[in-house]
């Protein structure tokens, strides 16, 4: 492989665009294939960059990779801003609220686990949590304060990555890839051959690479967008994650009084229609944690498809000669964009991968198949 190969990227969500921008900026010729660039699951995301509050015992590799990427996020955002595209990174941190006693016990377990790993996550009472976020319900039993988590405006980020990739010369082909065979990408218009192909097609990756069939699957998730009104409390200052009778919900503030509320998660194939049940669950859960949301204006309902793997780790590495996987990021696509882009560039340069990325190599598929 030459030092600066002509690179095809299949998929223009946050992962594909992050790779496209960094690769084009490094001097690679880049062609991106996507019929609807800068949309898809990334457009529907909440924007949380929260490896600590997403962590759970048994997923140490997921946490390690997430924290490595979180450390890279400030420089990643600063480089985008230096290119003229500010992604809207927030350093406000996260609180995690527990609605009832069982939810509270779950958070205590999570807090103890994180402290054992040396992570900063402090369990506080409901009263103390309301001092941090005054709009929280009086019914909240307690929660965690996690100052190190970040957040980003996902739609602003996507527009920034698309603009930066184009500025550095990336070519955008608004056609769907129908097949990826070796270094060849086939669309309805014909075939094009490249020096290397990066498969970043999210939930659709398993349909394009036989090696990933059955290992990357779609997980449906609905989100709502709301806006505070003149007579209501403003959105919380920080990202609020919560457990309400065991069900997760999150509220992520945006500029101009907007609030992103999510997210359901269930198996529904490639169905992209929001459901009344999903909308109801999100609104009921959010209102029990942050009551003012009941009077907000509901401005958008939408569903997206996360690309899930069996162990919640993405697949980062060579699938076949010249075909690199960058998919299966589950709910952490935005978080893992910097480390994924750096991992792909390291592969192209035949350099060591970033810390934590080796555990995400697709070679583990063979172990999954033996289970």
Image (cartoon, grey):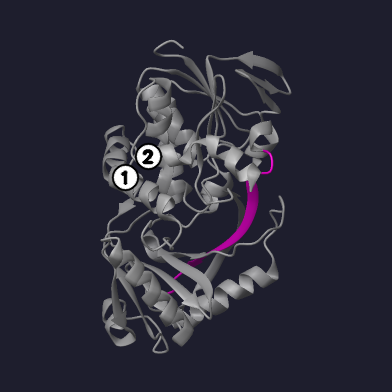
Q: Are marks 1 and 2 in contact (CB under 8 Å)?
A: yes
The residue that label 2 is drawn on is 338
Marks 1 and 2, how far apart at CA: 6 Å
Above or below for 235 versus 355: below
In the image, which disc is placed on residue 73?
1
Closer to us: 31 or 68 = 68
Identify the residue at the far top of this view.
2
Residue 96 in sight: yes
Q: Residue 14 at what x, y percent from top left?
A: 48, 41
What residue is rendered at 42% in x and 50% in y?
A: 61
220 in the magenta segment:
yes
Residue 231 in sight: no
Above or below for 251 versus 124: above
Among numbered discs 1 and 2, the one appearing first in the sequence? 1
Identify the residue at the far bottom of this view.
138
Q: Which residues are magenta?
A: 213-231
Q: Secondary structure at mark 2?
A: helix
Q: Residues within 10 Å of mark 2 (few under 14, many from 20)?
A: many
């Amino acid at each position: 492989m030459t030092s600066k190969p002509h690179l095809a990227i299949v998929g223009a969500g946050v992962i594909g665009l992050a790779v496209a921008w960094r690769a084009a900026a490094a001097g690679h010729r880049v062609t991106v294939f996507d019929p609807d660039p800068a949309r898809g699951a990334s457009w529907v995301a909440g924007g949380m960059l929260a490896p600590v509050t997403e962590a759970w015992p048994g997923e140490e590799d997921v946490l390690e990779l997430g924290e490595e990427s979180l450390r890279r996020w400030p420089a990643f955002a600063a480089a985008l801003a230096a290119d003229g595209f500010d992604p809207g990174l927030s350093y406000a941190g996260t609180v995690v609220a527990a609605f009832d006693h069982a939810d509270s016990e779950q958070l205590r377990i999570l807090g103890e686990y994180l402290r054992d790993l040396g992570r900063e996550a402090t369990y506080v009472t409901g009263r103390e949590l309301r001092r941090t976020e005054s709009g929280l319900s009086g019914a909240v039993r307690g929660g965690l304060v996690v100052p190190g988590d970040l957040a980003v405006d996902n739609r602003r980020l996507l527009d920034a990555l698309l603009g930066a990739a184009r500025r550095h010369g990336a070519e955008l082909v608004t056609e769907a890839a129908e097949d990826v065979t070796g270094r060849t990408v086939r669309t309805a218009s014909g075939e094009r051959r490249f020096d290397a192909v990066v498969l970043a097609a999210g939930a659709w990756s398993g349909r394009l690479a036989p090696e990933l069939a059955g290992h990357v699957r779609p997980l449906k998730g609905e989100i709502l967008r709301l806006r505070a009104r003149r007579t209501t409390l403003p959105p919380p200052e920080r990202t609020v994650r919560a457990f309400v009778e065991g069900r997760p919900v999150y509220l992520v503030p945006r500029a101009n009084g907007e609030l992103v509320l999510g997210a359901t998660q269930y198996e529904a194939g490639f169905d992209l229609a929001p459901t009344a049940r999903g909308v109801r669950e999100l609104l009921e859960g959010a209102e029990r944690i942050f009551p003012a949301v009941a009077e907000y204006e509901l401005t958008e309902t939408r569903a997206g498809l996360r690309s899930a793997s069996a162990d919640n780790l993405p697949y980062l590495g060579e699938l076949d000669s010249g075909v690199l996987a960058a998919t299966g990021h589950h709910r952490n696509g935005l978080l893992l964009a910097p480390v994924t882009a750096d991992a792909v560039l390291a592969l192209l340069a035949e350099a060591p991968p970033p810390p934590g990325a080796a555990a995400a190599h697709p070679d583990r598929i063979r172990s999954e198949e033996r289970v």
